[in-house]
Image (spheres, rainbow, N blue to C red):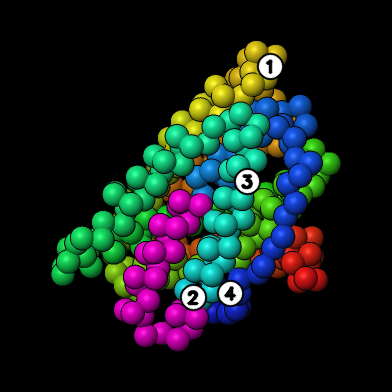
Amino acid sequence: METYQDEAISITPRDVQFDWDDLSLHYIEGQPIATHITNVMHITLPEGERAMVQALSDALPLVNDDRLRDEMIGFIGQEEIHSTSHEDLHDHLDRQGLDTGPIVRKLEWLVDRAFNRPNLRGRARHAWLCERLALSAALEHYTAVMGQWVLDADALDGAVHPVMLDLIRWHGAEEVEHRNVAFDAYMYVDGGYFRRARTGVMASFLLLGIFAWATAHLYRNDPTRGEQRFWPFQLVDGIRKGLIPSGAHFFTEIPTYLRRDFHPSQMGPLDKALRYLAQSPAAQAAAAH
């Protein structure tokens, strides 16, 4: 595919360094619900990324294409750093009373028991690997869409704590940068359209359910909940101000992903993502040490 060939870039893990000492409970000023929706990302992504790293690692021995192997190795390295960067926030959120433990434990169970299933052997093991790769490709499509949204959301400037804004934009930019990799790994190992379509729909509703459940948990545990506006008003206000996406992506991206000729490289240029990665304060701080 010509558009894909134009994106022959090196996928390289970047060290980052974040300081959370002065991060407030509601780091999107005046927006508790918008803050908690962003917190869901910090809590859920490490387990999701661990699952995808394992899926692509298991697929590596099956891939003989040198370019794809290099991209998969770079993808694995980036996702491992993403996972660690978000996990570092868990203790901080817990100290503020949000109690992330129940969410993390349920997601750990989902990944270890339902996703990885290490006891499978032979044809069943290969078939389940294809399922994991297909689901990883679908989930990565959504992370790339959200990554582009974060890069384009000018309303976040000045409204979000600057270190937090750097975290979500650095992460979003790398999701855009490596948006092809999980999809191409699935297409190389299996490539079946029905499996891709089925897991694409599953990923949409799985993500929507997890975000709704985890946001509700954080809202219930927010020590300032009694002082806040009714949560639907907060949600509408955050969307109206451009501080959180509307959630329509969970549905509007399904037809896009279900096109038979779909490829992530069709999503648009990488320029903004690569420019941000070149100037991210966290990446620059880590490089200086």
* Sequence order check, earlier mark of 2 and 1: 2
Between 217 and 187, the one lying in front of the other is 217
Between 97 and 209, the one lying in front of the other is 97
Q: Is residue 51 magenta?
A: yes
Tell which tag, 4 or 2, sits nearer the viewer: 2
Give, as a single range, the part of the protein colored magenta.
46-70
| Residue density around tag 2, few if under 14, some if 14–19, many if 20 or more, within 10 Å | some
User: Which amino acid is tagged 2?
Assistant: Ile
Q: Residue 58, position in %: x, y?
A: 34, 70
65, above or below 15, in the image: below
Determine which residue is flagged by label 1. 228
| Residue density around tag 3, few if under 14, some if 14–19, many if 20 or more, within 10 Å | some
Determine which residue is flagged by label 2. 73
Between 66 and 76, the one lying in front of the other is 76
Numbered label attached to residue 89: 3
Determine which residue is flagged by label 4. 11
Residue 223, image quadrant: top right
User: Which amino acid is tagged 3?
Assistant: Leu
